[in-house]
Image: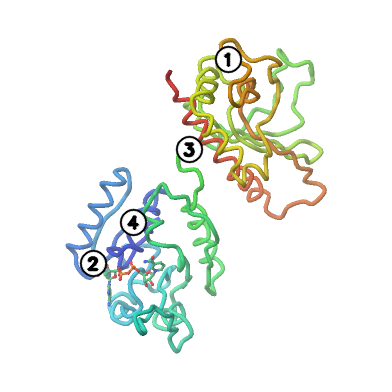
Amino acid sequence: MRIAVLGGTGPEGLGLAARLAQIGESVIIGSRSAERAEEAARNLREKLPQGSLAGTPNAKAAADAEVVMLAFPYEGIDVILADCAAPMNGKVVIDTIVPLKVVSKFFTVEPPEEGSAGERIQARVPSAKVVSAFKHQSAQHLIDLDHRMEGDVLLCGNDEAAKTLVADLVTRVARFDRKLGPVDPKKAMFRIYRDTRFSKDKTPYKTHFSAAIRERAKKGLEPGYYFHIDQHGVLVAGGGIYNPDPPTLGRIRRYIVKNPGALTRVLREPRFKKTYGRLAQEEALARPPKGFSADAPHIDAIKLKHYFGIVEVDLMKRPPKDLAGVIAGYFRDVVPLMEWLRRAVKETR
Ligand SMILES: NC(=O)c1ccc[n+]([C@@H]2O[C@H](COP(=O)([O-])OP(=O)(O)OC[C@H]3O[C@@H](n4cnc5c(N)ncnc54)[C@H](OP(=O)(O)O)[C@@H]3O)[C@@H](O)[C@H]2O)c1
């Protein structure tokens, strides 16, 4: 989708432009000056070489885009809309503008007579589908692409389809695990056929469906997210590394010994602790593995053969309205472990 960010040379617009380009949208930065627009796009391309980023004057940006985002100060509404209202006709317009005024050296919100910046814009461009969003997402966090954007984004608007479109952008922009490489949804699903060669159960089909969300190219040597739902409606969800090969397992164990505090921090991280409690204990060794002392820090973790967190929930007890959201919530809570594992599997000595 082509998205214009009018006033995109300022901190808020630049941050949003960067996040949108990062999720694969085609971004056109608008400005009152063609040079400033081009320079801003050039600078962002250095940060995001694969991003689709261009810069043009505001009116052309609005004309060339399918969605128009307004990211300039409140005082600019009338001036900019004088040029840009016509090219915005019928389009989804995302309003990020907070009507601020400086009173006695302090910023205060001063809503216009229409009620809000969004309503003022709607009054100036009646056919636009105005959605107010990102009003309290700080420019500083947006431009720091490693910063995990958390919290709610309030959406206001009268057009349901436009709000759905913006909600989708918000969700994708707030992706909670930026280090997860490209995932192919078709390859994420496990086959429904049971591998009867290695299973005591010789029935031909599984009675659950399951998926692993990870960068497939890494062949299980990097952590991934996993869930399955069985025929009784039991959901099992979590993430980590299951059955790592011996070199990977050795790296994880050595990383624990070398850097015990890093694992302590994961296990104490409030969301991980609340959802998962601890690392799953499946197939843990009874004695320390060869080369590791019984009094090594986190010896219980060193004895593990798999490193993952897992939750089990009976969905039939209280069927969730938003199952995908529930599963994504569990995945979000296992991110500290995922990040720790990514560092651990790179351990060389
Ligand atoms: N900064 C934040 O953390 C934040 C958070 C939430 C919402 N917002 C909202 O997002 C909007 C942009 O914030 P910002 O901090 O990026 O603002 P900004 O730096 O003051 O302005 C952004 C861009 O708008 C253009 N501009 C400035 N004054 C203008 C005027 N009078 N008329 C028309 N264009 C003008 C400039 O671009 P050109 O000179 O290149 O045209 C400027 O680079 C604001 O409405 C703000 O309330 C900001």
Left or right: 33 as drawn, with respect to 158: left
Q: Earlier in the sequence, mark 3 or mark 1?
A: 3
Q: Residue at x 77, y 51 (%)?
A: 319
Q: Label 4 is placed on what type of residue?
A: Val
Spatial CA distance of label 4 from label 2 is 13 Å
Q: Earlier in the sequence, mark 4 or mark 2?
A: 4
Left or right: 193 as drawn, with respect to 339: right
Q: Is mark 2 in CB contact (under 8 Å) with mark 3?
A: no
Residue identifier under label 2: 57
Which sits in the foreground, 210 or 295? 295
Q: Residues within 10 Å of mark 2 (few under 14, many from 20)?
A: many
Residue identifier under label 1: 292
Please say whether residue 219 is visible from this viewpoint: no
Q: Position of residue 105 (x, y in %)?
A: 34, 80
Residue 126 vertical position relative to residue 259 in the rendered view, above or below: below
Left or right: 202 as drawn, with respect to 240: right
Q: Residues within 10 Å of mark 1 (few under 14, many from 20)?
A: some
Mark 2 or 3: the one toward you: 3
Kindly state the secondary structure of the residue where label 4 is placed. Answer: strand
Mark 1 or 4: the one toward you: 1
Q: Quadrant of ligand 1?
A: bottom left
Spatial CA distance of label 2 from label 3 is 35 Å
Q: Position of residue 124 (x, y in %)?
A: 39, 82
Kindly state the secondary structure of the residue where label 3 is placed. Answer: loop
As drawn, which residue projects farthest toward the front?
295
Label for residue 27? 4
Q: Earlier in the sequence, mark 2 or mark 3?
A: 2
Identify the colour scheme used. Answer: rainbow
